[in-house]
Image (cartoon, helix red, strand yellow):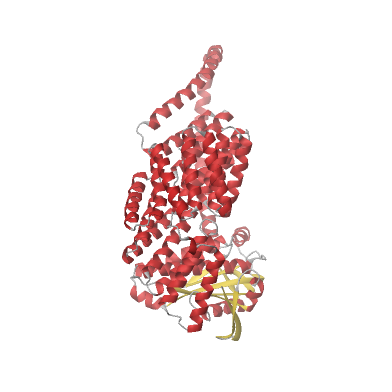
């Protein structure tokens, strides 16, 4: 059963469907948000819980509107909802925000983080007594179990969700759980019961105009037909789903529909149409950054290229599918891709490699379904097929061996002497190669350590010359961060917990700066410094650094809300960015480090200290470079220590 394509539709069923009056379009929600903000400003009720709650809810609805289409927007609006709700410990609003963040990370294939947010949503909805929200959160936890192959646990969550949602007496909201229970029936091969569940869900979804959910159920019915060998009706169901997804512009649904249609055409041996639909699915999957879907699409594309006998492209896409499936712990994806890789190697005549891939395929299937002896039986059959082919070669070789037997006996004495000499040569060669490998490993380790503390260009120069010259960078963008109230945090936490929190934050900062090609310079206590545009100058350094700064701010804001929900102390952060010339080079002879100097560094530090909590504060110089890329708010001329009045901007 092709579970990996079924799981693509789970995310369509995640949350309770909103009433039509709330989701007419994004523009109306944004107008509502502006109206709420205007009312707060007019009444000067900045701390009014009613207005904060209303604004939080609209931000949640906006985040939901972008599910599956724009991960950055989902994150942006969910964090705004979380921040506003956490300010007043409004549990329902926090539950909504945690749910939205759970969906975001599910799309990204980060199931560990996704489950964490769903569990937080469960906690908030339980405390608030919101049965609809609680049932939804439990359903979502079931989805995590489903994609990880833990079907009994998934079914347990779905049934618990169904029980709670029925108590809420709102039948249309039961439809996502009915669909998911239908998928469990799929796994148990109870196909008639599965289709019955899907059709019941479609009827309920139709009452609330949930077109995306209906499309998902059509896809799942199509999958059942496909399993039963009814490819014609399966294609019809997939096409219905595709048409609906085109109407609703549901990117995730479109990718899934194209992928399923592509697979049907491949199974019908129409490889050109299979490839065309698979490539359409891959393009959309990459746009919405869904590793789960990318893995499935690559599997379909690899199958199509295999059918077209383009072995190089088939190998590329199947390996990509296998790698992503492994990272996602998607055993169905691992099984499917390795089965195709086995077919590929068989077609190339490489039976030994085909056998290895087939073993992985069987092991993955065995992990999913725990069917005893499956691996042993199929391995034995594969080994028999492999050995049978080897027997033909062996018979021919025996004829040659018989002819050469007498000649071999004559040469026996000479050969033994040569072997003795050869053994000595091999002994010394082994010692030589062993030493050489140790040297190579030591060199590789030292190179990795060097690259961990120095930029690659500087490290190469240091290895080549024994030193590295200081470099004047005409224009670089420098980022500073600093935690507010670090001293008070240190008093509330144990040294171990404090270090763990700092480590978690700085590790995330390292990943973010690496993502945008920014060079980490150093950390000083709770301060973090990085720079873009060095050691190799580039034209995007300002944009890269501001993007990194915004992502760092979002990371800290997200962590803050989680800590508040758990009643724990939390970090808050100020971030400053300035652009200008710097001098860069290596300092010291022991524990040397790559560092930068100049007035630009000092000014960047002042941008941070003159900023506000949770804001990215940039200088006029940086603003001039990024004003067409970001929405910025002019703050006026602000006093900066040692700098006088300086024009500053907040990046919105």
Q: Looking at the image, which is closer to me, 85 or 200?
A: 200
Where is residue 184, by image quadrant?
top left
- Is residue 30 visible to us here? yes
Residue most extreme to the front: 207
Q: Quadrant of residue 401?
A: top right
Answer whether residue 533 is visible to the viewer in this image: no
Q: Position of residue 298 (x, y in %)?
A: 56, 43
Q: At which x and y percent is residue 441? A: 51, 49
Report the front residue among 215 and 466. Answer: 215
- 258 above or below 617? above
Is 618 situated left or right of 197 in this image? right
- Vertical relation: 197 (above or below) 390: below
Q: In front: 430, or 523?
A: 523
Q: Quadrant of the N terminus?
A: top left
Q: Residue placed at 52% from the left, 67% from the top?
A: 29
Pick the front one: 303 or 509: 303
Quarter placement of the C terminus: bottom right
Identify the residue shown where x is 47% and y is 41%.
221
Give the x, y percent position of residue 43.
Answer: 48, 83
Number of dots carrying numbers: 0
Residue at the spot 48% in from the left edge and 77% down from the top edge: 613
Residue in the image at 61% along x and 64% along y: 467
């Amino acid at each position: 059963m092709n579970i990996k394509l079924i799981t693509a539709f789970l995310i369509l069923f995640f949350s309770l469907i909103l009433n039509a009056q709330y989701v007419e379009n994004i523009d109306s929600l944004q107008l509502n948000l502006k109206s709420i903000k205007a009312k707060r400003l007019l009444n000067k009720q900045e701390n009014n819980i009613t207005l904060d709650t209303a604004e939080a809810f609209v931000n949640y609805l906006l985040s939901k509107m972008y599910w599956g289409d724009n991960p950055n927007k989902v994150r942006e609006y969910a964090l705004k909802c979380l921040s506003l709700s956490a300010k007043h410990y409004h549990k329902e609003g926090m539950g909504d925000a945690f749910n939205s963040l759970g969906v975001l990370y599910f799309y990204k294939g980060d199931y560990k983080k996704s489950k964490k947010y769903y569990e937080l949503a469960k906690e908030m909805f339980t405390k608030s007594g919101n049965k609809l929200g609680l049932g939804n959160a439990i359903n979502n936890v079931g989805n995590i179990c489903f994609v990880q192959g833990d079907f009994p646990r998934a079914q347990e969550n779905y049934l618990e969700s169904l029980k709670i949602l029925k108590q809420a007496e709102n039948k249309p909201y039961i439809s996502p759980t009915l669909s998911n229970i239908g998928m469990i029936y799929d796994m148990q091969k109870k196909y008639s019961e599965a289709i019955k569940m899907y059709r019941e869900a479609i009827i309920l979804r139709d009452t609330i105009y949930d077109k995306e959910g209906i499309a998902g159920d059509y896809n799942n019915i199509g999958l059942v037909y496909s399993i039963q060998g009814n490819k014609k009706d399966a294609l019809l169901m997939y096409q219905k789903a595709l048409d609906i997804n085109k109407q609703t512009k549901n990117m995730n649904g479109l990718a899934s529909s194209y992928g399923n249609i592509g697979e049907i055409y491949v199974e019908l041996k129409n490889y050109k149409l299979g490839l065309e639909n698979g490539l359409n699915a891959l393009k959309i999957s990459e746009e919405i950054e869904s590793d789960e879907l990318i893995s499935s699409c690559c599997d379909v594309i690899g199958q199509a290229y295999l059918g077209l006998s383009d072995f190089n492209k088939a190998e590329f896409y199947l390996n990509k599918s296998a790698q992503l499936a492994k990272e996602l712990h998607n055993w169905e994806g691992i099984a499917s891709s390795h089965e195709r890789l086995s077919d590929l190697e068989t077609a190339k005549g490489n039976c030994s490699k085909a056998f290895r891939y087939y073993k992985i395929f069987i092991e993955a299937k065995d992990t999913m379904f725990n069917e005893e002896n499956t691996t042993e039986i199929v391995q034995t059959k594969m080994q028999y097929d492999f050995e049978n082919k080897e027997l033909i070669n062996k018979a021919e070789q025996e004829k040659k061996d018989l002819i050469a037997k007498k000649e071999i006996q004559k040469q026996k004495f000479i050969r033994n002497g040569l072997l003795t000499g050869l053994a000595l040569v091999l002994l010394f060669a082994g010692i030589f190669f062993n030493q050489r490998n140790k040297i190579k490993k030591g060199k590789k380790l030292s190179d990795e350590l060097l690259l961990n503390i120095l930029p690659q260009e500087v490290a190469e120069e240091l290895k080549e010359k024994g030193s590295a010259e200081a470099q004047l960078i005409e224009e670089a963008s420098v980022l500073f961060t600093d935690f507010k109230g670090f001293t008070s945090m240190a008093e509330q936490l144990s040294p171990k917990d404090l270090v763990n929190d700092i480590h978690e934050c700085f590790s995330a900062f390292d990943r973010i700066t690496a993502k945008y090609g920014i060079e980490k310079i150093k950390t000083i206590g709770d301060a973090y410094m990085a720079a873009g545009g060095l050691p190799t100058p580039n034209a995007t350094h300002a944009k890269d650094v501001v993007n990194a700064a915004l992502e760092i701010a979002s990371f800290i804001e997200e962590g803050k809300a989680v800590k508040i929900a758990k009643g724990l102390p939390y970090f808050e952060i100020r971030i400053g960015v300035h652009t200008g010339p710097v001098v860069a080079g290596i300092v010291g002879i022991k524990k040397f480090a790559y560092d930068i100097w100049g007035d630009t560094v000092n000014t960047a530090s002042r941008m941070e200290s003159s900023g506000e909590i949770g804001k990215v504060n940039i200088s006029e110089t940086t603003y001039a470079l990024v004003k067409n890329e970001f929405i910025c708010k002019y703050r006026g001329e602000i006093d900066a220590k040692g700098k006088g009045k300086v024009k500053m901007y907040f990046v919105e």
